Image (cartoon, rainbow, N blue to C red):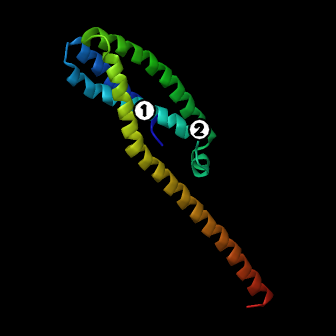
Amino acid sequence: MIDVALAYSGAVAAYKMTVKLVNAGRELSEVTGQLSEWYGCVSDIQKAGEQAKSQTLFEKASQGSETAEKIALDSVIRQKEFREKERELAFLLDYRFGPGTHKQVVELRRQIKKEREETVYKQMEAKRAIINNLAITVLSVLIFGAIGGGGYFVGVGAGAW
């Protein structure tokens, strides 16, 4: 699972740095690095909300339902904050670098989101699936072992062995 608090703190730091760079009159090429970091953190928070909505059985058992509800609520609140900050960034970028700059940034965001989905999020989903399957396998072995062991001891007790 993605740590929402960590992604949020990264997004806030990237937002503040982006605003400082724009206000300092830096070039767009210097600002895009901070923007990509900010959009990456925003994307992580959105993904955390999606993961909280679709927790596996193992995650529900180990973390509890309160954690999923808290993550979902945190991600919704933070997404609303990010929409507001994105409007502020749109104004700053269009004001500093000219009209249409924000549209270019939106294209950059789509590209970043696509790249993250192809690499990072697929790896995270694979890891979640492995952990879930491992937990199911271990529980199955334990259940069959208990049934087999119980049958063995019943047989020994009845003198069948």
Inspect the image, locate mark 1, and give the three-letter code of the amino acid beneath it.
Answer: Ser
| 123 over 71 or under it: above or below | below
SS at mark 2 in the image: helix
In this figure, what is the number of numbered marks? 2
Estimate how packed mark 2 is, as few (under 14), some (14 to 19) or many (20 or more) residues with alpha carbons within 10 Å: few
| 147 over 139 or under it: above or below | below
Q: Position of residue 34 (x, y in %)?
A: 28, 26
Which residue is pictured at 61% across the width and 43% down the height?
Answer: 64
Which residue is pictured at 25% across the width and 13% down the height?
Answer: 97
Q: Position of residue 68 (x, y in %)?
A: 58, 38
Q: Quadrant of the C terminus?
A: bottom right
Inspect the image, locate mark 2, and give the three-letter code of the amino acid beneath it.
Answer: Lys
Q: Position of residue 108 (x, y in %)?
A: 33, 28
Of residues 151 and 52, the one drawn nearer to the viewer in this rendering: 52
What residue does disc 1 label?
A: 43
Asked whether residue 38 is in view, the answer is no
Residue 53: which numbered mark, if any? 2
Q: Give residue 158's quadrant in the image.
A: bottom right
From mark 1 to mark 2, how far is it between C-alphas? 16 Å
Q: Give residue 73's quadrant in the image.
A: top right
